[in-house]
Amino acid sequence: MNRIPGANPRWLAQTAMILSFALLGSCDIAEREQYENATQAIQGNNPTGQEQPSLALQFAEPEQVGMSGERLGRITDAMQELVDDGLLAGVVTMVARHNKIVHFESVGYRDIEAGAPMTNDAIFRIYSMTKPITGVALMMLYDEGKFRLSDPVEKYIPEFSNLRVAIGTAPNGELITEESEHRMTIRELMSHTGGLTYGLFSSSTVDDLYNEINVLDSQSILKSMIDKLSAIPLRQQPGSQFHYSVSVDVQGYLVEVLSGQTFAEFLEERLFEPLGMIDAGWHIPPEKINRFAQVYQYNDSGTLIPKEWESWPRDYYEPATFFSGGAGLVATAMDYMRFSQMVLDGGELDGERVLAPLTIDLMHRDQMPAGVAYTPGLGFGLDFAVVTDPVEADSVSTGEFYWGGAAGTWFWIDPVEDLVFVGMIQQFGGARPDVRSLSRRLTYAAIMEPNGL
């Protein structure tokens, strides 16, 4: 039997998004009405007469979800001020509450030199915001009974059998190692407590070895990374401390082992296509180059200059071979909003079930081993940081969870206030303003009907 497109929630969501990008430069009232009218027309194309599910993330007036439109406007004003001061090139910000988009704005430039304005459909390097997506992908296989969190990683990646732990350096420069007290578990792999490192954010002999053999070679494949890691001792004992690491890249390889697909194939088939993440991927195809945001750094005088991240060189215009689960994806703000809303909604979006509600809940519980702390006020779950004490964390809601990317992208999910925020910029360097803290204060100040009081 032929399927009628109008009766397919996935098709509805993707078509509505395409229309929204065509209609929306910024989220003013007239444009939101156009989007809603287009969406209603699509939903009306239902010759079967069956009741259709309400599409996720339709546009609404902030007051409909207990927020102030005037106060949400302060986010745009604050970002514009940072652009005017030469501190940011361009920004896209989004807020959704109660499954409705109430703020979607872009200011500044996608490319300063070209005079190209930032747009809502700009595509960004999301770097470490790839990590929560990888975690969800792996937990989909958990839902299918493919592994337990307490399983040793070496059960599925035998190259990791008998990994030793570095404890010092001999006078001749050779590493002194000892046996691991226990085998690294998948739970530890997903909470950065497995003993791995990055070679980027700490200094040790093990970090030096990561860099010498280029563990994260963007021109290689995930299996090559595994082979390299298997020849290097762990930086610290598994379960002994939180240490940010390549563990999420290892998770991407674990998805390949457990699914029998490449990590790229798995994400496209099981996440991006079902969730309508139409621009998420590993490179920029020719037809989308005009939407790819330029990345910037600051020179010695504090001026923005176009420059890629030197620590991890990549050609985003060519198809990838190294599907980095830790940092490899590009996406739009809408792509990431759809992913985040699925997580907030307990693993389902537009009728597409990705994870079980209890599995999602498991991901944003604190998973730190006994006696191990992440940072004051925060715990760490399965590829998400989690607010355990809002006062210490300088936040609002207990249970808020989030992460960010190296070029400044950021998001958070607040189950208490039923809210998602997504912010996209493309800038490296210590002079980058603290847009994450600023946007959090302004967003919560716009909630007039809080759930948490």
Image: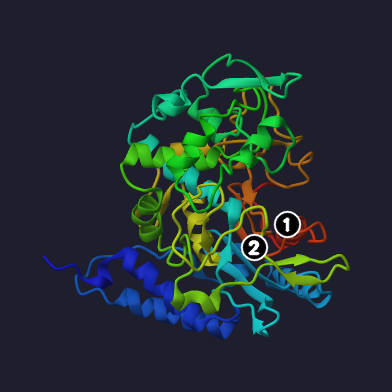
Above or below residue 161? Residue 20 is below
Q: Which mark is residue 436?
A: 1
Left or right of 260, for residue 128: right
Measuring from the top left, give residue 419's x and y in whole percent: 59, 55
The answer to which image quadrant residue 156 occupies is top left
Residues under numbered marks 2 and 1 in contact, where contact means CB atoms less than 8 Å apart: yes
User: Going by the image, does 92 lie left or right of 70?
Assistant: left
Instruction: Please name the residue shown 46% across and 51% down the image.
Output: 323
Label annotation for residue 423: 2
Location of the N terminus (image quadrant): bottom left
- Above or below for 411 versus 173: below
Instruction: Tell me what residue is drawn at x 58 percent, y 66 percent.
Output: 124
**Amino acid, disc 2:** Gly
Residue 361 visible to the viewer: no
First in sequence: mark 2 or mark 1? 2
Pinpoint residue 334: horizontal percent, then vertical percent.
52, 66
Q: SS of the residue at dot 2?
A: strand
Q: Nearer the viewer, residue 82 or 417?
A: 82
Q: CA distance from mark 2 to mark 1?
A: 8 Å
Residue located farthest toward the left when viewing the structure as drawn: 1
Residue shown at 64% from the left, 35% from the top: 209
Colour pattern of the rendering: rainbow
At label 1, which amino acid type do we have?
Arg
In the picture shown, does residue 43 fall above or below 196? below
